[in-house]
Image: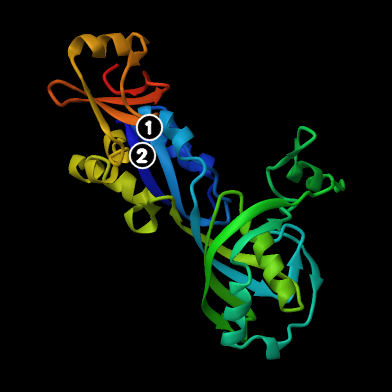
Amino acid sequence: MNGIIIIDKKKGCTSHDIVYKIKKIFNQKVGHTGTLDPMAEGVLPILIGKGTQCSKYLMNHDKKYNVKLQLGIKTDSADSEGKVIEEKEVNSNLLTEENIANILKTFIGKQEQIPPIYSAIKVNGKKLYEYARKGQEVELKPRQIEIYNIELIKYLSEEKQIEFEVFCGKGTYIRSLCEDIANKFETVGYMRELKRIQVGDFTIEESITIDELEKNIEDTNFIDEKIISIEKLFEDKPIIKLEKRKIDLLLNGVKLTQNFDDGIYRIYDDEDIFVGIGVIERHLLKRDIIMTE
């Protein structure tokens, strides 16, 4: 089994838990394209077999989330699992649907964001959350992020909660975004709930839960439908056809001269069988992901 399966991760389990379970199910090498917090739900692309070699092409995708922001309360971790460290009044006059929508729109574009202290960013060789757990202070440097769109879903006035959808680039911390939005409303806040609904082209609609996978593991048609093959993953890339002699050379690590532009290519043999993925640099084609070995 080689390819990618899109898992709808449920709250409470880690990305490593999902990898471990799927490794047991398929008895093959398994990886993922970026962790999702234990408290978060949603899209988690899982790489299986030779699909793990695709990770370098999948790490920096844009992402889309559904978020619930709790106003009036600040936690040390900026999410619902942290300890409450501050409470502040919420000015209901600022929380009309029109004003909320307008304030959310002010976050669209490129901007500097300070990451949360409970994150895996490394400073002097240690992850930020390691400093946080020991109560050690560390300078948090802002990083440039980009938010492409952000829209209000609904506002729950009694609960003082704002639900919104955000489409953002790599490196965006939604916990920090929630705190920044709360500041615009002259209060504090934290990320109460988070659901990732899209990673690159992978959407929540095509995902399945671990329970669904385990229930249908003997159904080969179901599994085939849910596994995104490496050939399909690169279906937008151009094709190069090679005769058997050149295929053998390529498989042995020989770089082949090709009069094509630099980039990623799907390689097929002269019988239209998918061989794998190759990369051209300076008109030299080299092997990358090979399916026939």
**Residue 211 placement (x, y as % from top left):** 36, 50
Look at the numbered disc 2 and give the secondary structure of its residue. strand
Picture quadrant where residue 91 is located? bottom right
**Badge 1 amino acid:** Gly
Q: Please say if the residues under marks 2 and 1 sit with CB atoms less than 8 Å apart.
A: yes
Quadrant housing the N terminus? top left
Quadrant housing the C terminus? top left
**Residue 160 placement (x, y as % from top left):** 64, 81
**Residue 13 placement (x, y as % from top left):** 53, 49
> Residue, x 48% and y 47% (percent of image)?
61
* Whether residue 27 is visible: no
Q: Is residue 239 above or below residue 185?
A: above
Q: How far apart are labels 2 and 1 at the CA level? A: 6 Å
Q: Give residue 4's mark.
A: 2
Instruction: Answer with left or right where residue 96 lies relative to residue 211.
Output: right
> Residue, x 62% and y 81% (percent of image)?
159
**Residue 267 placement (x, y as % from top left):** 26, 25
**Badge 2 amino acid:** Ile
> Residue, x 49% and y 54% (percent of image)?
63
Look at the numbered disc 1 and give the secondary structure of its residue. helix
* Whether residue 67 is visible: yes
| Residue at the limit of the structure toward the front, as seen here | 259
Picture quadrant where residue 120 is located? top right
Instruction: Answer with left or right where residue 118 lies relative to residue 1.
Output: right
For label 1, the residue is 51
Most foreground residue, 166 or 72: 166
Q: In this view, does 147 lie above or below 283?
A: below
Most foreground residue, 272 or 28: 272
Most foreground residue, 184 or 9: 184
Q: In this view, does 199 lie above or below 102?
A: above
| Residue at the limit of the structure toward the left, as seen here | 271
